Image: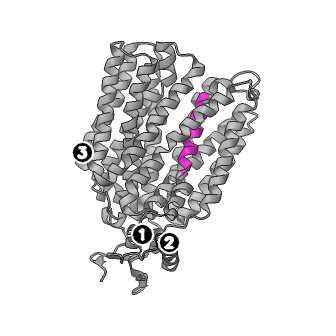
Amino acid sequence: MSEARAESGRTLTTDIPARLDRLPWSRWHWTIVIGLGTVWILDGLEVTVVGNIAGRLSEPGSGLPISSGQITGVAAALYVAGACVGALFWGRLTDKWGRKKLFMITLAVYLAATALTAVSFSSWWFFLFRFLTGFGIGGEYAAINSAIDELIPAKYRGRVDLAINGSFWAGAVLGSLLAILALNESILPKDVGWRLTFALGAVLASVILLVRRHVPESPRWLLIHGREAEAEEIVSDIERKVEAETGQSLPRPETEITMHQRGSVGFGEIARTVFSTYRKRAVLGFSLFIGQAFLYNAITFGFGAILTTFFDVPTGNTGYYFAVIAVGNFFGPLLLGKLFDSVGRRIMISSTYLLSGVLLFGTAWLFDQGSLNATTLTACWCVVLFFASAGASSAYLTVSEIFPMETRAMSIAFFYALGTAVGGISGPLVFADLTESGVVGDTVLAFQIGAGLMCAAGLVAAFLAVKAERRSLEDVARPLSEVAGKASATT
């Protein structure tokens, strides 16, 4: 193995990125997936539980003086606002302080906030800690996606990233089932069940925090920030573990990169890089996030209202239907993810967006014709979201790999905040009246808006998506620290 070697001043030539990318899949990589990826399950659990137990929280005797409208309105908006602010705040620090420090801090913030939500005694307390829970979750997205992409080998990066982002829906299934238990007064008292669901989130976060202690800092981040000795030690330790597991020596890395070490990048340089140097990639990121945000709001924002208004489904039974579409959402990225690494990003991103949009147009037409009931509509949604979930997950993958490493966390944070704001603010404003009016044509229009924007994003991806499959991050987007003309093959 060649070691990172310092040249003059703060310039060094290293093969560490190539050494990470040529590793075979191993138990060590599973540790990364479990330690970093499970936070999306917590996010799905949080969002789903609150939506499903809103009615119980607002009932007399729940122990909390709050109305259902305040839960689905004020509390939901504060959670979204917290996620947006947290993404931008923590994203900046992730690029500055490192991936590991931030994915430990942000999970600790989530853990504390959700535990304190469980002991809410007043509406203002509940609102405050819903905001802080979102604040922690928002920061997780930037720190986790950065670390995953920089630690997972290039040939597996697409499928791993999609599967991890799609695990949000495993949390949604769990949240739906927990809500059913929490609402059953024969099992838990009215003022206890909802508190235990939040407490469970804190318990799960505690377990994840323990696992994360064994996840190292990104060697790529260490290299840029003048800590090449630590990067070398981490990568050498990983290589020893992989060779011991496989019983075979690893092949020599094929490339080196020469970079000039530097401190953190300022906002001005980040903005110029993302919106000037990589203007087309920024358009791609905007399109993908806005498309998926509107599609999901077109279907899920009025999910319960559509079932109860048009098909007379009892409010207490909507959780079962939601669990079904959540399963479709979960299996989409899980089963299609490998194709993003083999068939390629451009074909798969554009096709999942276009196919989900076209299928939603078809669902809208069937709904307008009166050809669907609660079961068949849910089946249609399940199929639409099977493809849409893979596409939505690929939006996170895209913005995490198509910008230079020095701007990665901030880029993820920016586009995540954009998508979250669109989904949590613009989406409800557009779809609330449409899906709850009781007029078939209004709900059809909501479906068509979501489908149209999803198709538009698919067309943008067909032209602008970057061929990133099986390529190193440094090849997809040249680091700002790289010394021009210095990348070379090792001999």
| Helix, strand or loop status at disc 1 | helix
Q: Secondary structure at mark 2?
A: helix
Say which quarter of the image contains residue 210: bottom right
- In the rendered structure, which amino acid carries the disc numbered 2? Ile
| 3 or 1: mark nearer the eye | 1
Judged left or right of residue 318, residue 484 is: left
**Of pointers 1 and 2, the one earlier in the residue sequence:** 1
Mark nearer the N terminus (2 vs 3): 2
The residue indicated by pointer 2 is 238
Place of residue 254 in the rendered image (x, y in percent of width and height, measured from the top left): 32, 75
Residue position marked by numbered label 1 in the rendering: 20
Find the magenta span and give its range: 38-52
Q: Nearer the viewer, mark 2 or mark 3?
A: 2
Looking at the rendered structure, the secondary structure element under dot 3 is helix
| Mark positioned earlier in the residue sequence (3 or 1) | 1
Mark 3 highlights which residue?
462
Q: Quadrant of residue 125?
A: top right
Which one is nearer the viewer's eye here, 47 or 90?
Answer: 47
Q: What secondary structure is the stretch in magenta mostly built from?
A: helix
Question: In the image as oriented, which residue stretches furthest toward the bottom?
Answer: 8
Question: x%, y% of residue 261?
Answer: 43, 76
Q: Is residue 432 visible?
A: yes
Q: Which mark is residue 230?
A: none
> Where is residue 296 shown, x and y percent of the image?
43, 33
State the separation of the CA atoms marked 2 and 3: 37 Å
Q: Quadrant of the N terminus?
A: bottom left
Which residue appears at 36% of the width and 30% of the height? 450
| Residue at x 72% of width, y 36% of height | 195
